Image (spheres, rainbow, N blue to C red):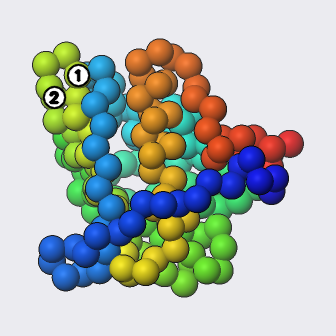
């Protein structure tokens, strides 16, 4: 890939207070309703608009599986929906699949927490149960994904990021 698409993942994991490895916490405020935010997280077509074209398929029920990828290009991740509490909380396991190096990390956990704040929402994404020295590719894309989500919900526009450029070029 050209250098313009390379983004250093400078986010450092912090030790999980439960002693289960490393974690990264991301918090953003979005002018939307909890229901609309939940739909953007769980609707595959909408989700692809802010996750670099990566679609996610699931029935979004507790205990169900999910898979994410760009059809014909790359499998991104798979996992289980551990806790599904619309429109407040979604907890998922995540196994990254795009390279042998990230596959070797195994499963981690992603928690989406939505809290209404007036006419907006606080969205907190916690990516934990990672080895403290995990490859930054596994969790380093969250700022681009969440920025794209915020832009999409507040303006209806898609945000151009290094990740979106990389995958749009890969799709041809």
User: Quick check: marks 1 and 2 in contact, CB under 8 Å?
Assistant: yes
Where in the figure is residue 142, as x and y percent of width and height? 45, 50
The quarter holding residue 63 reads bottom left
Q: Is residue 53 visible?
A: no
Element type where label 2 sits in the image: strand
10 Å neighbourhood of mark 1: few (<14), some, or many (≥20)?
Answer: some
10 Å neighbourhood of mark 2: few (<14), some, or many (≥20)?
Answer: some
Where in the figure is residue 101, as x and y percent of width and height? 61, 80
**The C terminus sits in image quarter:** top right
Q: Is residue 118 above or below residue 91?
A: above
The residue under the point 66% across, 73% down is 99
The quarter holding residue 42 reads top left
The residue under the point 53% across, 60% down is 9
**The N terminus sits in image quarter:** bottom right
* Residue at mark 1: 120
Question: What separation in Å lies between label 1 and label 2 (alpha carbons)?
Answer: 6 Å
- What mark, if any, has residue 116 been given in the picture? 2
Where in the figure is residue 66, as x and y percent of width and height? 47, 58
């Amino acid at each position: 890939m050209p250098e313009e698409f390379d983004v250093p993942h400078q986010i450092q994991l912090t030790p999980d207070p439960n002693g289960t490895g490393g974690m990264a916490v991301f918090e953003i405020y979005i002018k939307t309703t909890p229901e609309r935010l939940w739909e953007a997280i769980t609707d595959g077509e909408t989700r692809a608009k802010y996750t670099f074209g990566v679609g996610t398929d699931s029935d979004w029920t507790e205990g169900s599986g999910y898979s994410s990828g760009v059809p014909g290009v790359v499998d991104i991740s798979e996992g289980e929906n551990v806790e599904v509490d619309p429109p407040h909380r979604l907890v998922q396991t995540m196994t990254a699949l795009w390279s042998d190096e990230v596959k070797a990390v195994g499963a981690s956990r992603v928690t989406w927490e939505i809290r209404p704040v007036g006419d907006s929402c606080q969205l907190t994404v916690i990516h934990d149960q990672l080895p403290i020295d995990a490859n930054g590719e596994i969790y380093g894309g969250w700022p681009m994904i969440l920025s794209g989500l915020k832009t999409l919900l507040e303006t209806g526009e898609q945000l151009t990021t290094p990740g979106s450029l990389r995958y749009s070029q890969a799709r041809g």
